[in-house]
Image (tube, rainbow, N blue to C red):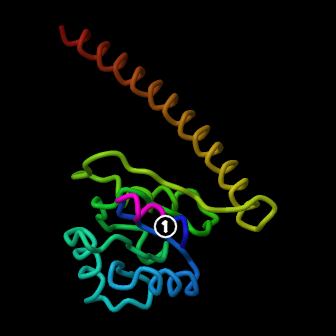
């Protein structure tokens, strides 16, 4: 909560993701009417209201969300900083959640901070996330190289086919 408080005191709007109800409650108490919350417990009709308030109301400085409930499909471009209070096991879940503030309509720089301490479960998960991210990069790089090769073959076949007609 102190890290988020420092960001807010420096004029930033902050999106916080956590999987722990206790953290949600602590942040709600700390920021009171200057925060909105979206978790799995948030009724469907209140979800868009929370998003709209965060987006439009300059007094709403903190969006508190559960990674599964709020990490996908929302536009939170008025946020300046995403803070992950705890870590999920899947890197793509973090990347998707980061993209909530990094979407079309975003003005200015966006930041993401992952909070964890070494020699803790989250420290262990952070190491695993880095390994998984590197594996994703390798797979994407190999797929991109193969796609280039396929494009070259298609261009060659297309060129030969065009030459046969002439």
Helix, strand, or loop for circle 1?
A: helix
Q: Nearer the viewer, residue 95 or 161?
A: 95
Where does the C terminus fall, quadrant-wise? Answer: top left
Q: Which residue is mark 1?
A: 4
Q: Assess whether residue 9 is covered by the magenta stretch.
A: yes
Q: How many marks?
A: 1
The dominant secondary structure in magenta is: helix
Residue 52 picture location, percent across and down? 22, 74
Residue 49 picture location, percent across and down? 24, 82
Where does the N terminus fall, quadrant-wise? Answer: bottom right
Q: Quadrant of residue 10?
A: bottom left
Q: Assess whether residue 137 is covered by the magenta stretch.
A: no
In magenta, the rendered stretch is 4-11
Work out whether 153 lies above or below 31: above
Q: Residue at x 49, y 72 (%)?
A: 67
Work out whether 80 lies above or below 70: above
Residue 76 picture location, percent across and down? 31, 64
Q: Nearer the viewer, residue 11 or 96?
A: 11
Q: Residue at x 38, y 50 (%)?
A: 110
Q: Is residue 97 left or right of residue 107?
A: right
Q: Residue at x 57, y 57 (%)?
A: 91
Work out whether 10 lies above or below 160: below
Question: Going by the picture, which residue comes out furthest to the right?
Answer: 119
Q: Residue at x 19, y 69 (%)?
A: 56
């Amino acid at each position: 909560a102190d890290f988020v408080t420092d960001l807010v005191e420096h004029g930033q709007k902050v999106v916080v993701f956590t999987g722990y109800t206790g953290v949600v409650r602590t942040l709600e108490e700390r920021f009171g009417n200057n925060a909105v919350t979206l978790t799995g417990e948030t009724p469907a009709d209140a979800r868009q209201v929370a998003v709209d308030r965060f987006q439009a109301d300059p007094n709403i400085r903190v969006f508190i969300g559960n990674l599964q409930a709020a990490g996908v499909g929302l536009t939170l471009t008025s946020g300046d900083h995403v803070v992950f209070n705890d870590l999920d096991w899947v890197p793509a879940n973090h990347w998707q959640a980061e993209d909530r503030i990094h979407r079309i309509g975003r003005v200015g720089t966006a930041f993401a901070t992952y909070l964890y301490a070494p020699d803790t479960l989250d420290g262990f998960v952070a190491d695993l996330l880095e390994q998984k991210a590197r594996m994703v990069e390798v797979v994407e790089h190999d797929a991109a190289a193969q796609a280039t090769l396929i494009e070259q073959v298609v261009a060659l076949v297309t060129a030969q086919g065009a030459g046969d007609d002439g």
